[in-house]
Amino acid sequence: MLKRMKAGSIRWQIAASAITPVILVSLLAILTQPLTLYEPESLSYARGTAVKIEMVTEQVRAADTPEQLAALFAIVSKSGLQVEEVSTAELAPDASLSIPRKDARQLVRNNLPDAILTSFRAETTTGKLHNVLVVATGDGRALAFLPPAPPADSWITDKQINLTLKVMVVILPVLLLSLYAASMITAPLLKFAEAAETLKPDEGPDRPFDENGAAEMRTLAKSLNDMRSRVRSMIEDRTRMLRAISHDLRTPLTRLRLRAERSTQPELKASFLADIAALSDMIDDTLIYLSKEMGAEKLLNADLPSLLETVCADFTDMGYNVAYVGPERFAYRCKPRWLARAVTNLVENSTKFAQRITVTLSAVGAEVVRISVQDDGPGLPGNLRKRVLEPFFKVDTARTTSDRTGFGLGLSIVDDIVRAHGGKIELLNAIPHGLIAHIDLPAEDAASVVSAPQPKSNASRATA
Amino acid sequence: MSAHLHLVAPETGSRILLVEDDHEIASMVVEMLSDNSFEAIAVGSATEMDVLMRNQSFDLVVLDAMLPGEDGFSICRRLRAASVTPIIMLTALKDDIDRIIGIELGADDYITKPFNPRELMARIKGLLRRASYSTDQRVPQSPMEFAGWLVDPIPRQLISPDGVHVSMTTAEFDVLLAFCRNPGRVLTREQLLGLTHAGLAGPVERSIDVHVSRVRQKIEPNVREPTFIKTVRLGGYLFTPKVENR
């Protein structure tokens, strides 16, 4: 219980710790109240009526003249308790009558002193009243009383209502105050959480946490702001370092490249140039992976088919067999350079294992647009298909048909870019062989992608 | 070495200043430029450059972005404020932002390290040729518009009449830029090759026709009957839309 409370909201913890003592005090007060408090209305009525009856019998004894007696009866009857004089014979107990315990007369009689002789009568021989309580006056006379109908017992007495109201007057303000105090204390915390949630390490204000309010909150905000400054300067340091490394690595590479160009041995020159290109690509991949400056490119309304055709064209110009299949026009809101980089990395990966590569644009349902890169290579066993997306993971180099290897960052960059676009990537094996990479991106108007089944060949468009 | 470069008369004898702090790279580039009949001088820092520029003039400056002391971007801004001498930036970062910043600062072209020396030569020659045009023809860095399409040379963007960004390869964009700068004029394949750096990027040399057909694929309303880029029999290509500078 305590453990659960500690894990709960601070707001409720504060509220609870403020309210609990107040409730305990009020409970204590209620419990120590005299038990009579719980007397129902019927009991107080019975006692009241009994006292009245005693008083009436006393005054009847004291009355000297029949006139006085008549006047007394008239006054008493007006108060609701009807009374008349009956013969003392009526005082004899009538065994044939059984009066329920809850009857008003029974309750009244219980409250009369035992010394007073009483009996119940349905009818009296001399009087006009029915269902009466006959009481001996003690001086040889008898009176028949018809008590007024007792009030119904309610589930709560007036006194209880009174007490409850009193307790409420104490508890309610405390309750409201403590709730207000709790939310006042916790509101900045929630604001901090929100600020931290939306925080971008390299953008936005310098000190995003509001350094106002309670002393502890100010301290917390200050340390959060300081931490953010440290993170920011760390990122700046890293960016500076990356630029420096990049520059320092490229200078000797440029030297190598220039030297290689002067080589008189064509084979040596070609292998030099290939190695230099591979090294350069590795530096690019590392920088892209580490910098993650995807935020730098704005979201644009870009034509996906032209983007994919451009990627394919860049590869066909390098001598690879890469074809685009899909619609001619489809505008999609994305970061086109990054999306092109993702597709380029996938195609590049395929060129290492396969001869023919097809890039397809299609719609999956009404809200997903799919870019697929399919090759005719050996494909990948299931356990590797997930792992190739991990950074620095490399499939055994013996599987490659070329000697171009990188750091194993290419596909993790693809994964990052696709996820930044709110999409997901899936790798599948093609039948009979080959690898298919599906990039599924959310799109509101995916249905407007009407797939053109015929691949565009150079022959069909070169005619003019 | 691709044959087409010889079709364009090299601007022989032009004076080129190379600002590069790595001596070996500098000496190799200078040697290559000299082999191509340029007069090239290399300096290692902004201070040396300033001393040299006080009493000499150059037709083109090749500027390394990372230099000891004042960096290349700052030098570029300073040079551009004082003169119209063409500037090529050598950047170590393949970072697009750096390239664009370099051009916004006034650089006319950029090339990333490690660069292909032939590409550097082609870009130097291209810039010198453009610099020899009158100033009117040399304002091609401003955005141009044809038939609702917007061609923006600095971020190298093509935007359709619907406001959609259309991607292009470097060669395709160069071809389109060449067309936009010469509307209503027949451009031969040789001229197009000269105006673009097409074919330098990869080992497979594509004919200019391939690039033209790809451009058509992206901009023509009907690819089968092109109306924007018309083929002129035995001549080359003609760009028909009216082009407006913006």
Image: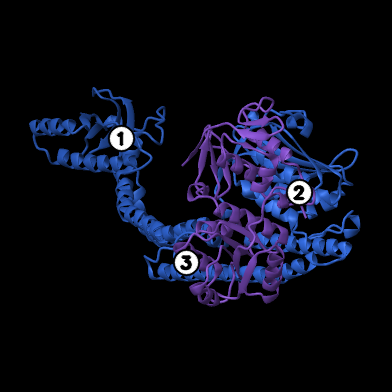
Chain colours: A blue, B purple
**Kind of residue at disc 2:** Leu
> A66 or A80, which is in the foreground?
A80
Using the image, tell me which numbered label, if any, was put on residue A346: 2
> Dot 1 corresponds to which residue?
A151
Disc 2 with disc 1 on a shared chain = yes
> A141 or A98, which is in the foreground?
A98
> A100 or B214, which is in the foreground?
B214
Q: Please report the residue visible at 77 percent of the width from the left and 59 percent of the height from the top.
A: A408
Instruction: Tell which circle, 2 or 1, labels the residue nearer the N-terminal end.
Output: 1
The x and y percentages for residue A169 are 30, 52
**Kind of residue at disc 3:** Arg
Which quadrant of the view contains residue A173? bottom left
Label 3: how many residues lie within 10 Å, few (<14), some (14-19) or many (20+)?
Answer: few
- Mark 1 vs mark 3: give the one in front: 3
What's the chain of the residue with tag 2? A
> A312 or B86, which is in the foreground?
B86
Say whether residue A9 is visible: no
> Dot 3 corresponds to which residue?
B78
What's the chain of the residue with tag 3? B
The x and y percentages for residue A438 are 74, 42
Disc 3 on helix, strand or loop? helix
| Cα distance between the residues tagged 2 and 3 | 42 Å
